[in-house]
Amino acid sequence: MRMFSPFTFKVIIERYVFIAILLLALCSFPIMKSNFIIFLEVQHKMSKATRAFILNSLLFFPNYNLAKCIDDYFTFYQIKKWCSGNKPPVYINCSKENTEKNVYSLEEKMIGKYMIVMSITGFICLLLLFFLDTTLWKLRTFLSQYVYFGIYKTFRKEKVSKELSGESDDEDVQNERQRILGQPRELLNSAVLIKELTKIYFKYPVILAVKNISVTIQKGECFGLLGFNGAGKTTTFKILTGEETVTSGDVFLEQFSITKRLQKVKSRVGYCPQSEALLEYMTGREIMIMYARLWGISEPQIQLYVNRWLSSMQLELHADKLIITYSGGTKRRLSTAIALMGNTSVILLDEPSTGMDPGARRLLWDAVTWTRESGKAIIITSHRMEECDAFCTRLAIMVEGKFMCLGSPQHLKSKFGNIYVLKIKVKIDAQEDKLNDLKFFITMTFPGSVLKHENQGILNYYIPSKDNSWGKVFGILEEAKEKFNLEDYSISQITLEQVFLIFANPENTEGDYQEKVP
Ligand SMILES: Nc1ncnc2c1ncn2[C@@H]1O[C@H](COP(=O)(O)OP(=O)(O)OP(=O)(O)O)[C@@H](O)[C@H]1O
């Protein structure tokens, strides 16, 4: 059986339990009282049929049933106690027939009937909740796509055409978009297809969180979604899990549209959210057994299956402890194991390594690698560049809701690695004139160089590597060391982290780097 992502499942259970407890707590005791009134005060004034109708109607209310269970159980227990004493009150029927009844039976004044009705209504309410979950979601999607966005487009035409055009300065991003728009979706044959996806939070102020992004992710691919805080990564994930609605565009998982076939899509996604979605009063083993059952693993195989996933994240020692006692890193390991263990075709990991020690990170990398090799598509967000370099087959850097570049880590490093990173440390006592002379010297000697940072006499330059061999750059800087009295300098090649910083730094406007460094 294919069911829900852990996050959705937890939310529904929490809502269900919360509503049930609230209703029971608020209503049981007043109903007990009204029941008491019906019986003792007005029963003689109403006809038998009316009384039966009222009491049967009350069976639709779980809180009435609960109140009746408590009430009748207590009464039965009290009668038994009195009858077993020496002097039972005269108005009590202490016959064997009356005291030796089974309290759980369906007889009059026994609680069996109420327990059965309560179970049935509980089940119906749960189904209703799932139904409302999807219906309300459709309503939210409709309002967001046609009402709010329609109004927004009318009043902010310029902003919409500028920010949400989907055009990009990066040719890889642009090519991917053209490929997606130019082909029917069946031909793209991808595990995940994100097509012109836009998400706007219609609050005050209006936030354009995701701005017309398009990408395909194939089976067996691990796609990294990188970007600074607030870039729109989690919003994209929330859309992929059906937690947030789409403002415009669409997302297809194995050809199923998220706006039209939400349940189909949900059943294909394993999700490790940024915030823990674990039921904390279960043990690690119990929660994994629960999810294994939900994923339809057959009963005889469950122990073996769960043990395999527990050991993949080295959780055996913690397996039988309550989750509430786990450390942050252990919770992340458990969340990741749950996301990876289902028979889903797409796995979303939102910063899975946060809080993990280096050993646990290695385990995560191994687990992700062999899960990917088994043919699943994985989408991961991370702020660790070495992690993305290790196992992402492709990645995109997102800035303010847009893709700034797209490709394999190696492709990005080669594409944007046509620069040297030059760090110069000037002696603290160097005069202002000398510093300015040095800057002038670098600008003139290395045309196209860009001063990225300057702090406490340390200058960081990006220098084009074209026409500048290592030998030439070192030779020039050795000369400059004498001439400008430099304390130290270093030259290095660009890393993935520096590629990230070029694009993800909000101070860099689009094409800033390309304009300055040919
Ligand atoms: N429920 C919400 N209501 C309004 N605005 C939101 C909501 N969720 C996110 N945002 C806004 O949308 C933008 C993108 O947020 P998002 O959480 O997707 O970023 P992120 O890239 O995942 O960041 P982080 O790396 O911190 O997780 C931010 O400006 C954020 O403030």
Image (cartoon, helix red, strand yellow):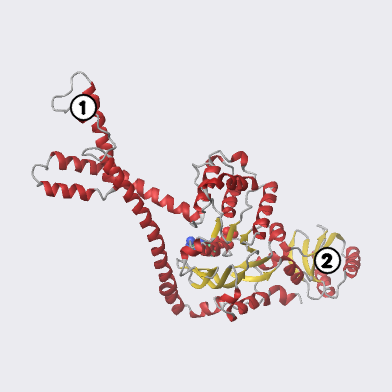
Q: Quickly name the residue at label 1.
A: 96
Whole-percent x, y for residue 65 in the image: 27, 44
User: Based on the displayed image, in which of its 4 quarters is residue 192 positioned?
Assistant: bottom right
Q: Position of residue 482 (x, y in %)?
A: 91, 63
Could you say whether the residue bearing mark 2 is in a helix, strand or loop?
helix
Question: Is residue 315 positioned above or below 382 on the image?
Answer: above
Q: Residues within 10 Å of mark 1 (few under 14, many from 20)?
A: few
Which one is in front, 348 or 384? 348
Decide which of 20, 30 is in the foreground and name it: 20
> Total label count?
2
User: Can you give x and y, in whole percent of width and height, for residue 8 in the image?
Assistant: 48, 56
* Frontmost residue, 98 versus 217: 98
Identify the residue at image location x=45%, y=74%.
Answer: 149
Give the answer, above or below, for where 145 lies relative to 368. Answer: below
Residue at left offset 58%, top offset 73%:
214
Q: Is 143 located above or below residue 334 in the figure?
A: below
Q: Is residue 57 left or right of residue 130?
A: left
Tell me the crowding category of disc 2: few under 14, some 14 to 19, or many 20 or more residues within 10 angstroms, Cα based. some
Q: Quadrant of residue 174?
A: bottom right
Say which residue appears at 20% left-offset and 30% top-offset: 97
Amino acid beneath label 2: Lys
* Residue on which disc 2 sits: 434
Farthest residue to the left: give it: 45
Of the 4 image quadrants, the one containing the C terminus is bottom right
Q: Position of residue 37 (x, y in %)?
A: 16, 41
Q: Residue furthest front?
A: 300
> Which three-letter amino acid code belongs to the residue tagged 1?
Lys
How far apart are the two marked residues, 1 and 2, measured between alpha carbons?
110 Å
Foreground disc of the pair 1, 2: 1
Classify residue 159 as left or right of residue 489: left
Q: Residue at x 59, y 81 (%)?
A: 182
Q: Are marks 1 and 2 in contact (CB under 8 Å)?
A: no
